[in-house]
Amino acid sequence: MAELTSKQRAQLRAMANSLEPIVHIGKGDLGENLIRQADEALEARELIKCRVLETSEYTAREAADALGKATRSEVVQVIGTKFILYRQSHKKDKKDKIVLIRK
């Protein structure tokens, strides 16, 4: 995946404003189940918001980088305890695909 431009990041941040966090990272390591959950959510939605709980041993930046690498997705933004991940869907027939603005 090509690196996102600042305009594309701004577009994705605006789209993620209304999203609720669907992946919550708590105690323990970033396990297989958490990675699978994030991977499935990215495939279905392309853009997800995640939250790092107070009990987590990870900071939001560490969790975003680790989860982004594990799911082959781009970290769009990290703010406080929340972060946004984006990955283009592999399903060609998906109707509501996110169309990024041109570079």
Image (tube, grey):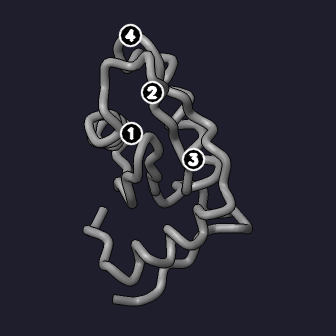
Q: What element does badge 2 sit on?
A: helix
Q: Where's residue 73, x and y in %? A: 37, 50
Instruction: Measure the C-alpha gap from mark 3 to mark 1.
Output: 10 Å
How crowded is the residue under tag 4: few (<14 C-alpha within 10 Å), some, or many (20+)? few
Marks 1 and 3: in contact by CB < 8 Å? no
Q: Amino acid at mark 1?
A: Thr
Residue identifier under label 4? 28
- Label 3: which secondary element: helix
Q: Nearer the viewer, mark 4 or mark 3?
A: 4
Q: CA distance from mark 3 to mark 2?
A: 12 Å
- Image position, residue 30 (x, y; %): 37, 20
Report the amino acid beneath label 2: Ile
Quadrant housing the C terminus: bottom left
Task: Classify 10 Å Cα crowding around label 1: few (below 14), some (14-19), many (20 and above).
Answer: some
User: Residue most toward the right?
Assistant: 95
The amino acid type, in three-letter code, at marker 3 is Glu
